[in-house]
């Protein structure tokens, strides 16, 4: 599978910089992300949500509105499995971004912020990976 990188310069909601890195290895994705944010991949400020044999992970940076999602592979058409992985990683991203802007917990007052941002991320990532799924 060919490695692909999709960069979202700045989301329109919180102005977070993020990317989706498809293919290659987890280490290659971390190396690429470190270069983009000017931190060595060994920096203690970069946090990885999962370790091990997962189909994806997310790299976040403490205190910065930046993250990168790595997906081992993406099928030609969306499947329940890959959509589940994207939703999983997008929830980590949602928590990171909202925590960084000062919303630390899901409460009655913040629930909609979490839900809307999570839906935005899943929708944007899916539309970038499978352009034919984008609605007009």
Image: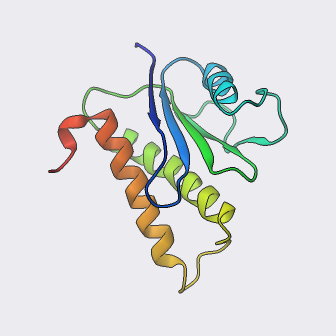
Coordinates of residue 7 in the picture (x, y in percent): 46, 34
In which quadrant will I find the N terminus? Answer: top left
In the figure, 20 relative to 88: above or below? above
Coordinates of residue 70 in the picture (x, y in percent): 54, 32
Side of 106 where 52 appears, left or right: right
Identify which residue, 78 or 129, lies in the foreground: 129
Q: How many marks?
A: 0
What is the residue that sits farthest to the left in this orientation?
A: 136
Q: Is residue 79 visible?
A: no
Q: Residue at x 46, y 51 (%)?
A: 11
In the figure, 86 relative to 24: above or below? below
What is the residue that sits farthest to the top in this orientation?
A: 2
Coordinates of residue 38 in the picture (x, y in percent): 73, 30
Q: Residue at x 68, y 24 (%)?
A: 35
Q: Residue at x 33, y 34 (%)?
A: 129
Side of 91 where 122 appears, left or right: left
Q: Residue at x 55, y 58 (%)?
A: 94
Identify which residue, 57 or 53, lies in the foreground: 57
Side of 108 where 87 appears, left or right: left
**How is the structure coloured here?**
rainbow
In the figure, 100 relative to 61: above or below? below
In the figure, 95 relative to 32: above or below? below
What is the residue that sits farthest to the right in this orientation?
A: 44
Side of 105 where 128 appears, left or right: left
Coordinates of residue 69 in the picture (x, y in percent): 54, 38
Q: Is residue 75 visible?
A: yes
């Amino acid at each position: 599978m060919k490695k692909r990188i999709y960069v979202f310069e700045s989301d329109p909601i919180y102005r977070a910089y993020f990317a989706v890195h498809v293919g290659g290895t987890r280490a290659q994705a971390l190396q690429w992300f470190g270069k983009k944010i000017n931190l060595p991949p060994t920096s203690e400020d970069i946090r990885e949500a999962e370790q091990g044999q997962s189909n994806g992970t997310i790299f976040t940076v403490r205190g910065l509105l930046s993250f990168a999602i790595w997906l081992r592979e993406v099928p030609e058409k969306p499947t329940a499995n890959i959509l589940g992985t994207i939703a999983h990683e997008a929830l980590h991203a949602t928590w990171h971004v909202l925590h960084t802007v000062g919303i630390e917990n899901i409460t009655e007052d913040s629930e909609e912020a979490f839900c809307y941002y999570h839906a935005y991320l899943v929708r944007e990532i899916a539309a970038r990976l499978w352009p034919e799924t984008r609605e007009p």
